[in-house]
Image: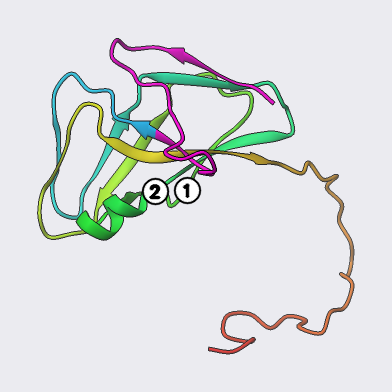
Amino acid sequence: MNLTFQILREGAKIPLRATEYSAGMDLSACLTEDVVIPPHEIRLIPTGLAAALDEPSAMLMICARSGLSTKHGIGMANGVGIVDTDYRGELCVPLINQSDTAFTVTNGLRIAQLIAVPVYMPQILTAETLPDTKRGTGGFGSTGA
């Protein structure tokens, strides 16, 4: 599988893996000026990149960086970003500041991780009932604490 990047803005950084076996590639902010994220607010941060996978049964996931989250309370507003294999627009990252202190995003700051993931494309069916399981309809908390 190949992942091809298009540079949309001057200064955009092609994502790289931090180590040989890192699952994610670091996405960096591509900014002309710093972006301040006030406490408990969201800002959409551009990367200056578009991407294309050559495998239609895969997608890209954009995930938070654990260092930003644990050290600064910065996460992704949507939890995980899903980039469909046919999307060709700019990759942007919605960051949320979950702390009580403003956080400044600077140009080139590593803001998220990009991961290629296989996708199953099931046929959609309907039925009057579903197959029984031991769990059945047990929901939240039904398997323990």
Q: Disc 1 marks which residue?
A: 80
Residue in view at x 18 percent, y 59 percent: 99
Vertical position of residue 136 compared to residue 63: above or below: below
Precedes in sequence: disc 2 or disc 1? 2
Q: Is residue 134 magenta?
A: no
Quarter occupied by residue 88: top right
User: Regarding mark 2 in the picture, which secondary structure is present there?
Assistant: loop
Q: Nearer the viewer, mark 2 or mark 1?
A: 2
Q: Disc 2 marks which residue?
A: 64
Q: Quadrant of the N terminus?
A: top right
Q: How many marks do you count on the picture?
A: 2
Q: Amino acid at mark 2?
A: Ala
Residue in view at x 29 percent, y 10 percent: 10
Taking the view exactly as shown, the residue that stands out farthest to the bottom is 144
Q: Which residues are magenta?
A: 1-26
Residue in view at x 35 percent, y 19 percent: 48
Residue 82 relative to residue 133: left or right: left
Mark 1 Cα shell of 10 Å, populated few (<14), some (14-19), many (≥20): some
Residue in view at x 76 percent, y 44 percent: 120
User: Regarding mark 1 in the picture, which secondary structure is present there?
Assistant: loop
Vertical position of residue 142 compared to residue 94: above or below: below
Q: Position of residue 28 (x, y in %)?
A: 33, 30
Q: Position of residue 67 (x, y in %)?
A: 30, 52
C-alpha span from label 2 to label 1: 7 Å
Taking the view exactly as shown, the residue that stands out farthest to the front is 20
Q: Are marks 2 and 1 in contact (CB under 8 Å)?
A: no
Observer-nearest residue: 11 or 62?
Answer: 11
Q: Position of residue 41 (x, y in %)?
A: 21, 49
Quarter occupied by residue 27: top left
